[in-house]
Image: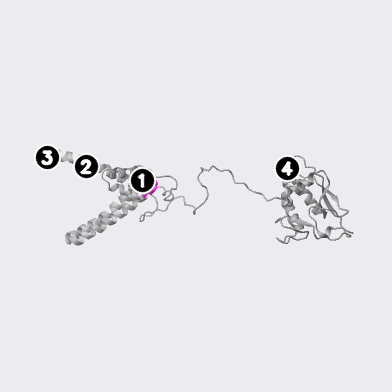
Amino acid sequence: MTQARYKIVFNGELMPDASLEATQENLARLFKSDLTRIHSLFIGKTVDIKRDLSENEADQYLKALQSAGAKVRKEQDFAASLSLVETDDHRAPDSEPVNNAQMTCPKCGHQQAKAIECSACGIVIEKFIARQTMLAENPPEVVSPAPSSPYATPKATVAESLPEFGELKVIGIEGRIGRLRYLAWSLVLILACMPVFGIAAGFFAASEILGGLLMVIAGIAVAVISIMFGVKRLHDIGWSGWLLLITLVPVVGGVFSLLMFIIPGSTEANRFGPPPPPNSTAVKVLALLWIALIIVGILAAIALPAYMGYADAAA
């Protein structure tokens, strides 16, 4: 027994809440056709949109076209009739082939004689329209990006993610150190170089040339390491290390050096890297000791001349 065939019939009616203009645009997009041909479907005349379908295919067309806004219905196809897509195997048995009939490819728009395949892009027209119908029935989800302010900070990852804290390196100018660590490292540098200068002084007593050479080498090493500490301190503030040259300017350099001890560093990552690790107990103790030594030195510089003047007057 031959399986029943069905057709999709349309008489120009619209689904509830569907607008005429939107429905016509949906059908034009669905069938890859121009609006002029689609307008001819809405003149109130019953038209067979698609014929010779299985029941499953007819249900798919029915659902897709109703979703587009057209109030179509499914009927059993007892005889061949015209459809939007014409093929040679749908003609009546006694009719002669019409070789001069033209058709438009629904994919590329190529004009050609009626055929099953498009001579330009090679698609099987029936299968292409069936595929478009299925896509209209189950359209892919399009996730719209959330609107963002054009003035907002860019969130895209343009480099590898930074760690929470930067790596501490004594030698080198990369990275950042805070105020307390700057003081602590400076004190350790002074304490470490004192034996070196003591040894150089011992050689100086034996040989002025050798002792002088050791003094110069030790002085250059201390100066280079001090510059490295200063550059990393400026990086923590967010300033370029070249600003350390200001310390060479009389008076202004002393004020700038004081600012390096006072201005705190940024708590977030800046262009020089992530913030330094939290200060350890040893760093805090050494920094406080260095501050205490500075205060004692200032007091001694004030009190010593007064004491010497008093001693001379008493004598």
Q: Check contact, mark 4 vs mark 3: CB within 8 A.
A: no
Q: Nearer the viewer, residue 16 or 28?
A: 28
The dot on residue 222 is: none
Residue 171: give x, y in percent of width and height. 35, 56
**Disc 4 marks which residue?**
21
User: To which residue does mark 2 refer?
Assistant: 301
Give the quadrant of the C terminus.
Answer: top left
Q: Nearer the viewer, mark 3 or mark 1?
A: 1
Q: Which badge, 3 or 2, comes first in the chain's sequence?
A: 2
Q: Amino acid at mark 1?
A: Arg
First along the sequence among labels 3 and 1: 1
x and y percentages locating residue 203 in the rendered image: 20, 60
Residue displayed at 25% across by 54% down: 194
Residue 238 lies in the magenta-colored region: yes
What label sits on residue 312 in the rendered view?
Answer: 3
Residues at marks 4 and 2, CA–CA distance in whole angstroms:
93 Å
Q: Is residue 267 above or below residue 207?
A: above
Callout 2: few (<14), some (14-19), or many (20+) C-alpha neighbours within 10 Å?
A: few
Q: Is residue 63 left or right of residue 144?
A: right
How many marks can you see? Answer: 4
List x then y, in percent, for residue 35. Answer: 73, 47
Residue 157 lies left or right of residue 4; in this view the side is left
Q: Secondary structure at mark 4?
A: helix
Label 2 near label 4: C-beta < 8 Å? Answer: no
Name the kind of residue labelled 4 in the image: Glu
Going by the image, does 278 lie left or right of 302?
A: right
According to the image, label 1 marks what residue? Answer: 179
The mark that comes first in sequence, 4 or 3, is 4
